[in-house]
Amino acid sequence: MEVFGALVIAKLLSVPMVMAYHTHVPMYIPKYTSSWLVTPMWLVIKFLHRAADLTLVMSHALGKEMNAAGASTAEKIRIWQKGVDSDSFHPRFKSQEMHNHLTDGVPDTPLIVHVGRLGAEKNLDFLKKVMRRIPHVRLAFVGDGPFRSNLEQMFQGMNVTFTGMLQGEELSQAYASADIFITPSESETLGFVVLEAMASGVSVVAARAGGIPDIVTQDGETGFLYTPGDLDDCLSKIMALLESSELRQKIGAAGRAEVEKFDWRASTRQVRNEQYSAAIWFWRRRKEQLANRFSGWFNRCPR
């Protein structure tokens, strides 16, 4: 409801308004409730973003979808540059103790880590198919969410660890201590966990969907992308990394170098200096257009 209040205040004060769209609610609705709610949700989204002077999205894919849905025009949709805390997420947090914990006391076991909210929309059941093909590998779920109990039943008896929520240095260690980071989600507007994994120097394997290709921009160099739902494609990327520590180090280092270009300071500067300036320009243009329409109507009125 806050967004409606912000919109009303912006209109009353006659100031520019920038809206950010970073949770793709229509994609999640069918996972949790009735699919018929998707259409009214899009109506709400279109109402809000058409009223805004600028819409910020996390990825080019999401921007195209917003434009195609009629939520805003292409010129008023801008990319919010990705940012990550590359000090808090860093290879120096690699920990043998954490690796032992995540592998359940068997440190020689290859370790794949997934970090994030455990929700039905994250496509995490795909990882069961992965684990059936590589049962000698340990998979660790770091995080919590409404789908956790389902996942624990689903993976019962398999080489899988659930840590629950980790924060601070423990979370940094969980990332940095993995051999591979994986996310099968096909609905990420950006995928901050992918940024954090890359900052931690860990090789990433992710679905080529949503905003993730905006992060792993060099497939096979800064990370690996697989065709969504293609088990063999996913496994080929995982096995290539598991079979070569040199490749893991190379991909991890390249990923780290990539995200070092982006931090929150740079992201904030872009929003403040570029995006806000664009919003002000569109706001002024809209005022001029309204003034011209009113003037034209007034001049046509009989006197």
Image (cartoon, rainbow, N blue to C red):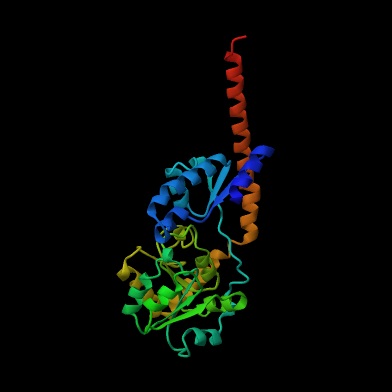
- Reply above or below: 281 against 154: above
Residue plotted at (39% across, 55% down): 34
Quadrant of the image for the C terminus? Answer: top right
The percent position of residue 290, horizontal first and vertical second, equals 59, 28
Q: Position of residue 297 (x, y in %)?
A: 58, 19
- Please tell me whether residue 93 is drawn above or below residue 277 in the rendered image: below
Residue 92, how many percent across, how many down?
A: 59, 78
Residue 87 located left or right of residue 68: right
Residue at the image point whose x is 56% and y is 53% from the top: 80
Which residue shows up at 38% across the image and 73% down it?
A: 127
- Residue 241 placement, left or right of 260: left
The one of 137 and 151 positioned closer to us in this rendering: 151
Residue 167 seen in the figure: yes
Question: For the view shown, which residue lies furthest in the right direction?
Answer: 13
Q: Is residue 64 visible?
A: no
Taking depth in this image into account, of 293 and 239 the one nearest to the observer is 293
- Establish if 197 lies above or below 1: below
In front here: 154 or 192? 154
Provide residue 209's location: percent of width, then percent of height. 41, 59
